[in-house]
Image (cartoon, rainbow, N blue to C red):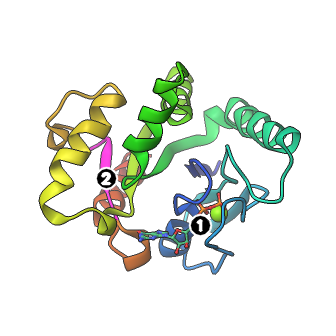
Amino acid sequence: MSKEIVLIGRSNVGKSTLFRELTGKKVKIGKRPGITRYPFKVKVGEVFYVDMPGYGFMLKASKADQEKTKDAIVEYFELHAKDILLAVQVIDAASFLDIADRWEGRGEVPFEIELWEFLNDLGLDVVMAANKMDRIAKLDRDRALDLISERLGMLPPWSQWPDKVAPISAKRGQIEPLQRIIGKRLAMA
Ligand SMILES: Nc1nc2c(ncn2[C@@H]2O[C@H](COP(=O)(O)OP(=O)(O)OP(=O)(O)O)[C@@H](O)[C@H]2O)c(=O)[nH]1
Ligand SMILES: [Mg+2]
């Protein structure tokens, strides 16, 4: 039976860019949210990598269609939970905190935090890929990762969570921390 490694996250965080790096498959990427519309799977060795559409705001999609995408994503995880070896929640580390603050300012639970809790509650092995690290100044990186991890319920310093938090830059091909985690899970499977 084949297991899945699923990339999930808000639109435009770089899931498909990361998928290309992981699989070598040239899926479509773009500057605007809403590029990937359906789950896309590719088999590498013994596992399937799955690139999911982004949830939340999507260009050229109605509010109703965005809700449908969100429901489809939730359903996908519920149906496939037993086949999922690893859920990789990709975030844009450079904008995560601003967006979370904005939502909380409106009295709402930030979507990305809700998703993180949903995936963990399903009993999945979830890792957070903090992407676009190249957009954060070197000196600010540890602090940003501490704050992000804390928002997701992991006490700082973030370096305590090498199996849960992977700072990467998919666009630059710098994904070693995630590759290491995936390698470990594959060895255990
Ligand atoms: N600076 C920077 N930009 C990145 C990085 N990874 C991806 N991007 C850019 O982010 C944008 C969105 O990338 P995609 O890979 O299409 O994002 P996605 O999450 O698949 O988006 P949807 O399919 O719309 O959900 C593109 O312009 C990428 O070049 C990164 O590590 N650093
Ligand atoms: Mg995509």
Which of the pair 165/68 is nearer the observer?
Answer: 68
Disc 1 and disc 2: Cα gap in Å?
17 Å
Identify which residue is drawn at 52% across, 58% down.
13
Q: Which mark is residue 166?
A: 2
Residue 27: horizontal and vertical position, in percent?
67, 75
**Residue 125 can be seen in this image:** no
Q: Is mark 1 within 8 Å of ligand 2?
A: yes
* Residue 5 as seen in the image, left or right of residue 142: right
Say few, some or many: other residues with alpha carbon within 10 Å of mark 1 (under 14 / 14 to 19 / 20 or more).
Answer: many
How many numbered marks does the figure carry? Answer: 2
Quadrant in which residue 163 is drawn: top left
Asked if 66 appears above or below 36 in the picture, the reply is above
Residue 182: horizontal and vertical position, in percent?
39, 55
Identify which residue is drawn at 42% across, 33% down.
101
Q: Is mark 2 within 8 Å of ligand 1?
A: no
**Residue 40 can be seen in this image:** yes
Identify which residue is drawn at 70% across, 54% down.
53
Name the amino acid type tagged 2: Ala
* Residue under numbered circle 1: 16
Q: Is residue 77 one of those drawn in magenta?
A: no
Task: Name the secondary structure under disc 2.
Answer: strand
Identify which residue is drawn at 54% across, 72% down.
23
* Residue 109 as seen in the image, left or right of residue 54: left
* Residue 188 as seen in the image, left or right of residue 158: right
Where are the magenta residues, as a range? 163-168
Task: Name the secondary structure under disc 1.
Answer: helix
Residue 16: horizontal and vertical position, in percent?
59, 66
